[in-house]
Image: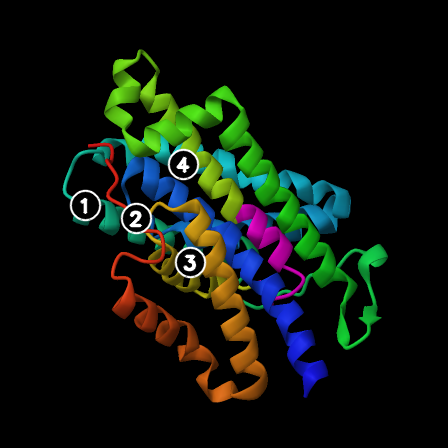
């Protein structure tokens, strides 16, 4: 029993950090742009399919380009579509991003087909690792290390670089950033692109763990919304803590009560919101509009 709990705990951390990557991007977009991007899961799926194509044609080293490609798609989407809706009825943004999600899924089906496609991990990361009661795959530990490195790099970028400080300031008070002479539309475009790139990176890492299908967007976007709600809208630290909680709860219920695995994270969200209606670290933030 103890061995199963420890092993599932490690798997839950891996799953949780993948969810965190998706949720941080969603939280970044909400905090700075003030919009709820329903299409965020579609960018996750797009990252997995970009990785699938790059891995088959050029080998595993090329998959590092997949998140960059997804981020560039996000930049185009923001400049062509999302930018036109700033300051308008939030319902219009929800409708637009929902339609965009359906459009991206349709493009995926047209280009890559509707059937599930497996992605094998790099040969160097094949096999298992056993350490005491912990039994897990080498690739899962590599995913854990990669997500920690990405989150650490994101934290360093936001906290230590001038552009990162502009992004953080803009998420608090975008109008003030604009009044200081900073090109606010360019900041918003970059934030949307970075959020999409993070979702794409999560899709790349998840590809060998999940079956790559057009519908995998839903497997990412629903946990992401739950995590952002639990952590508090716009809170990066809250998204990290909530993501780990959701990953652990999902992993443990999958192991010991499989029938409840699908509803466990929603029960966790309901329990936390009863105590903290704004989420664990929710605040009043100013948004662009």
* Sooner in the amino-acid sequence: mark 3 or mark 1: 1
User: What kind of element bears circle 1?
Assistant: helix
Q: Name the residue under label 2.
A: 36
User: What kind of element bears circle 4?
Assistant: helix
Q: Mark 3 points at which residue?
A: 224
User: What kind of element bears circle 3?
Assistant: helix
Magenta highlight on residue 271: no
User: What kind of element bears circle 2?
Assistant: loop
C-alpha distance separating marks 1 and 2: 8 Å
Q: Mark 4 points at which residue?
A: 192
The answer to which quarter of the image holds residue 25 is top left
Between circles 3 and 4, the one closer to the viewer is: 3
C-alpha distance separating marks 2 and 3: 11 Å
79 sits to left or right of 256:
left
Residue at coordinates 40% horizontally, 31% vertically from top-left? 168
Above or below, 271 relative to 279: below
Dot 1 surroundings within 10 Å: few (below 14), some, or many (20 or more)? some
**Of 16 and 139, which appears nearest the observer?**
16
Q: Position of residue 279 (x, y in %)?
A: 32, 58
Instruction: State the mark number for residue 173.
Output: none
* Sooner in the amino-acid sequence: mark 2 or mark 3: 2
C-alpha distance separating marks 3 and 4: 16 Å
35 sits to left or right of 110:
left
Q: Mark 1 points at which residue?
A: 90
C-alpha distance separating marks 4 and 1: 17 Å
Q: Do the residues labelled 1 and 2 touch (CB within 8 Å)?
A: yes
Q: Give the range drawn in magenta.
A: 200-212
């Amino acid at each position: 029993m103890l061995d199963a709990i420890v092993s599932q705990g490690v798997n839950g951390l891996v799953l949780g950090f993948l969810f965190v990557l998706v949720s941080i991007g969603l939280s970044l977009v909400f905090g700075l742009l003030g919009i709820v991007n329903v299409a965020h899961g579609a960018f996750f799926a797009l990252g997995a399919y970009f990785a699938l194509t790059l891995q088959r044609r050029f080998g595993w080293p090329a998959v590092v380009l997949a998140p960059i490609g997804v981020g560039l798609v996000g930049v185009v989407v923001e400049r062509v579509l999302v930018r036109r809706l700033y300051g308008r009825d939030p319902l219009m943004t929800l409708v637009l991003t929902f339609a965009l999600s359906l459009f991206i899924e349709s493009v995926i089906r047209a280009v890559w087909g509707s059937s599930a496609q497996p992605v094998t991990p790099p040969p160097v990361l094949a096999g298992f690792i056993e350490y005491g009661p912990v039994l897990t795959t080498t690739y899962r530990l590599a995913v854990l290390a990669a997500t920690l490195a990405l989150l650490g790099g994101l934290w360093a970028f936001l906290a230590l670089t001038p552009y990162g400080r502009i992004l953080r300031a803009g998420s608090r008070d975008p109008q003030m950033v604009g009044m200081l002479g900073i090109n606010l539309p360019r900041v918003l475009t970059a934030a949307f692109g970075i959020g999409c790139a993070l979702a794409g990176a999560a899709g790349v890492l998840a590809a060998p763990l999940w079956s790559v299908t057009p519908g995998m967007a839903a497997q990412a976007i629903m946990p992401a919304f739950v995590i952002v709600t639990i952590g508090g809208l716009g809170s990066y630290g809250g998204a990290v803590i909530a993501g780990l909680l959701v990953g652990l709860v999902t992993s443990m219920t999958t192991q010991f009560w499989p029938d409840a695995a699908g509803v466990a994270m929603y029960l966790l969200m309901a329990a936390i919101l009863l105590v903290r209606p704004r989420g664990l670290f929710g605040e009043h933030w100013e948004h662009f509009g």
